[in-house]
Amino acid sequence: MADTRFFDRAGPFTLAQIYKAARLDPLVESAPSFVDIGRLEDAGPDQVTFFDNIKYRDALRSTRAGACFVHPDYADEVPAGTLAIVTPQPYKAYALTAQIFYPGVKPAATIHAASHVADDAVIGVGTTIEAGAVIESGAQIGANCWIGANTVIGRGVVLGDGCIIGANATVSHTVIGNHVRLYPGVRIGQDGFGFAIDPAGHIKVPQLGRVVIEDGVEIGANTAIDRGAIGDTHIGAGCWIDNLVQIGHNVRLGRGCVIVSQVGIAGSTVLGDFVVLAGQAGIAGHLKIGSGVRVAAQSGVMRDIPPKSDVMGSPAMPIKQYMRQVATLTRLTRKRGKDD
């Protein structure tokens, strides 16, 4: 159960309401009702849980939850005291249900007296600006936004409706769509790492582009996205970017990309739609990564990758090729050990 000092819980909800929230076939019967969500291991009879990972099969068999979202392949393993809610996407159903129990809160629409809003800034209806925030000249903030404490929205920045900008973030040279969330400490729109190398001293190249962020993007804490040098850095609609990611100048992300923590993408690289970069992957500059590509954790990508490829290693290569190399090296070292 979530700590109520930090999270406000709604409910209880009937089974019919849960089915509706989870986007399952309509259920006329409304009983029973549930007061919370919980883990397989410790959920009680008045809580809803889910099973979506074979590693937790034993926990499924012993759960005391009142109801459990479960894939059809494992429905017969749900214990007798637990209602099996069968769906091909149990984790998605759980996520949608969790949203109704914990819908999140937004403070009253106020501009705090300790914030600093330029006279010519445009602030949309229903927007909250917390203490210490700075909204500079010419900035445009859409309706129903939430600007966190000590955040700086730079000159001329545009935010669409329903955006949430966490505390201590800085946003400059950026145009942002609707329903974008930037977590605390995000840095968007700063200079890219652009300079001409010279033995007498490196020469700074003015960074004259912007960052354009489309609708529905989430960007994790302490991530940095540089503005373009000439042209824009572009983040496509629905991208989810984790904490501590670095995206260089003029990088372009397609729709729905997932970028996991500590990834670095060097300048001018272009990603297609729904690319997944796992943790600590490094992507060199001026590359083209096709739509649907998946890059394994800690891989180093140094060449273009065609669409729908799965790659691994440094330098990155098709996963099957990488695993064959690992297997060959393992056999060779074992043979060497026996010969010694």
Image: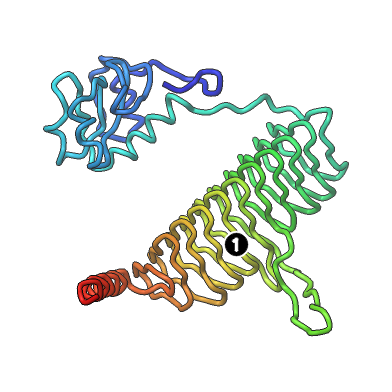
Give x and y (percent) for residue 150.
76, 38
Q: Secondary structure at mark 1?
A: strand
Residue extending farthest to the left is 76
**Is 105 located above or below residue 153 in the figure?**
above
- How is the structure coloured here? rainbow
Above-or-below relation of 184 to 306:
above
x and y percentages locating residue 159 in the rendered image = 68, 48
Please indicate, yes or no, whether residue 89 appears anywhere in the rendered image: yes
Would you call the spot at circle 1 few (<14 residues within 10 Å), some (14-19), or many (20 or more)? many
Quadrant location of the N terminus? top left
Which image quadrant for residue 306?
A: bottom left
Q: Which residue extends farthest front?
A: 340
Residue 335 is situated, as x and y percent measured from the top left of the image, at 21, 74
Q: Is residue 184 above or below residue 309?
A: above
Location of residue 5 with respect to 191 vertically, above or below? above
Amino acid type, residue under disc 1 in the picture: Ile
Q: Nearer the viewer, residue 334 or 131?
A: 334
Residue 320 visible? no
Residue 120, percent from left and from top: 86, 45
The C terminus lies in quadrant: bottom left
Q: Is residue 2 left or right of residue 74?
A: right
Residue in the foreground of this view, choosing between 293 and 25: 293
Q: Which residue is mark 1?
A: 247
Q: Would residue 282 be found to the left or right of residue 113 on screen?
A: left
- Residue at horizontal 64 percent and vertical 58 percent from the top: 225
